[in-house]
Image (spheres, helix red, strand yellow):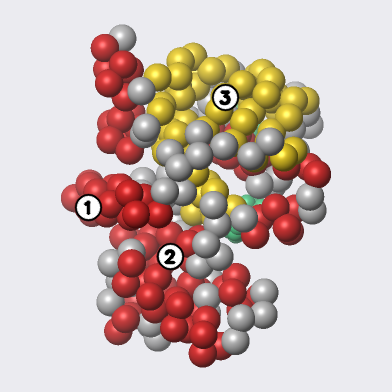
Amino acid sequence: MIRFDAVSKAYPDGTVAVDELSLTAPSGQITVLVGPSGCGKTTSLRMVNRMVEPTSGTITIDDRDVTSVSATDLRRGIGYVIQHAGLFPHRTVVDNVATVPLLTGTGRRQARRRAIELMELVGLPASFADRYPAQLSGGQQQRVGVARALAADPPVMLMDEPFSAVDPVVRDQLQQEFLRLQGELGKTILFVTHDIDEAITLGDRVAVLAVGGRLAQVAAPADLLAT
Ligand code: ADP
Ligand code: ADP
């Protein structure tokens, strides 16, 4: 479980991005942070893997303060997927997926074998292994991004608008496949989107943020619809 306890972030220029956020993201569930642009969603997500340090408050994962371990160790247990996949353009698909295992000492052959399994898990044919990111569609690149995040088998996944840059038909497909995958994997997921429909489709719980970084509401999707 990820827990935010009265977490605030003011950037050096005085912008209050997140204001006293208290929220839990239960283990094995998808918790969606939704709200308009600028309401502090990305900042909230990045405080979990310590790309951004809170001004005050604490964040714990399974009751352990995220600041109690080094950022490197912390990130080993946290997959991170962003909007434009953030793939390394000069590395092949399989090497992108295997980035973390290769960095942490897994042998090439084993890393490649596992990377191809992960590609298939996210719906990418093994024949794409030796292509470069630019030779893939946007939706396919996002699949590579998800496979790369899964490669370290992290219990926690942070996902920042992972499906927002692809066309609506592909987005629907990615959402459905992502739900099926999560049904198997049961990761603890914090998922950021500005799209309320996506929040309702994917969220076990939906946290609505308002401009100024305040939490407006937390509800199951069905209850959200009722309000
Ligand atoms: P969202 O993801 O909901 O669009 P962000 O977390 O990116 O929101 O940003 C929240 C607020 O913090 C916005 O007003 C944004 O302009 C501001 N902000 C984000 N990053 C920085 C930064 N590095 N320095 C100053 N202000 C920032
Ligand atoms: P930018 O300012 O270009 O967005 P960031 O400071 O956000 O760069 O991050 C630098 C790089 O580190 C990013 O490409 C991001 O993918 C990577 N990164 C940060 N945290 C993690 C993580 N927990 N897991 C994997 N990659 C990470």
Q: Amino acid at mark 3?
A: Leu
Mark closer to the observer (3, 1) = 3
Secondary structure of the residue carrying numbered label 1: helix
Q: Amino acid at mark 2?
A: Ala
Q: Residues within 10 Å of mark 1 (few under 14, many from 20)?
A: few
Image height of 103 relative to 217, above or below? below
Residue beneath the point at 43% across and 65% down: 147
Viewer-closest of 99 and 204: 204
Tell me the quarter of the image containing the N terminus: top right
Which residue position holds label 2?
147
Q: Is mark 2 within 8 Å of ligand 2?
A: no
Q: Are marks 1 and 2 in contact (CB under 8 Å)?
A: no
Q: Is residue 188 visible?
A: yes
Q: Residues within 10 Å of mark 3 (few under 14, many from 20)?
A: some
Which residue position holds label 3?
23
Secondary structure of the residue carrying numbered label 3: strand
Q: Residues within 10 Å of mark 2 (few under 14, many from 20)?
A: many
Residue beneath the point at 73% across and 58% down: 73
Instruction: Provide residue 127's location: percent of width, then percent of height.
Output: 30, 84
Alpha carbon distance from label 2 to label 3? 27 Å
Q: Earlier in the sequence, mark 3 or mark 1?
A: 3
Which residue position holds label 1?
173
Residue beneath the point at 53% across and 18% down: 215
Alpha carbon distance from label 1 to label 2? 16 Å
Viewer-closest of 162 and 67: 67
Asked if residue 68 lies left or right of residue 221, the reply is: right
Q: Earlier in the sequence, mark 1 or mark 2?
A: 2
Image height of 212 relative to 113, above or below? above
Secondary structure of the residue carrying numbered label 2: helix
Image height of 75 relative to 115, above or below? above
Alpha carbon distance from label 3 to label 1? 29 Å
